[in-house]
Image (cartoon, rainbow, N blue to C red):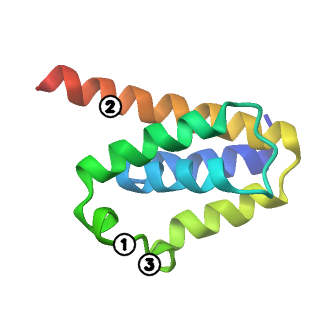
Amino acid sequence: MSEEVKFVIDIIKRMSINEKLRLALNMTISNYLSLEYDTTELCYHYDCILREIDEDYRKCYESHKFFTVNFTMAKLIEMKKEGQNQVALFLFNEIETKLNKTKQAI
């Protein structure tokens, strides 16, 4: 795993679940990333979850308020395809793990 991938993963580890979902949405709709995933299905899935847990997102999506998400997207755009997909895999697994823990707690 390259240093740039490790750097971005460290940023993601410190994000809140809302920021992770926003990043996942940005990644799935971006034309600058070459992800090897069903981005349409993932986009819909993360959009629905974010609407449930984030009232601000339901009102309007203002991406300029989320510096960490935008910075991470910029780092991802600079990466090669393999690095982008490694980060995407980590992020998607991280989100599902957090969501499963939340469901189990309920």
Mark 3 burial class by Cα count in 10 Å: few <14, some 14-19, many 20+ = few
Nearest to the observer: residue 15 or residue 65: 65
Q: Position of residue 17 (x, y in %)?
A: 36, 47
Q: Point out which mark residue 60 bears.
A: 1
Q: Residue furthest top?
A: 104
Nearest to the observer: residue 98 or residue 39: 39
Q: Amino acid at mark 3?
A: Lys
Q: Quadrant of residue 59?
A: bottom left
Mark 1 burial class by Cα count in 10 Å: few <14, some 14-19, many 20+ = few
Please identify the quadrant where the N terminus is shown: top right
Q: Which residue is mark 2?
A: 99
Q: Which residue is mark 3?
A: 65
Secondary structure of residue under mark 2: helix
Q: Position of residue 71 (x, y in %)?
A: 62, 68
Q: CA distance from mark 3 to mark 1?
A: 12 Å
Q: Amino acid at mark 1?
A: Cys
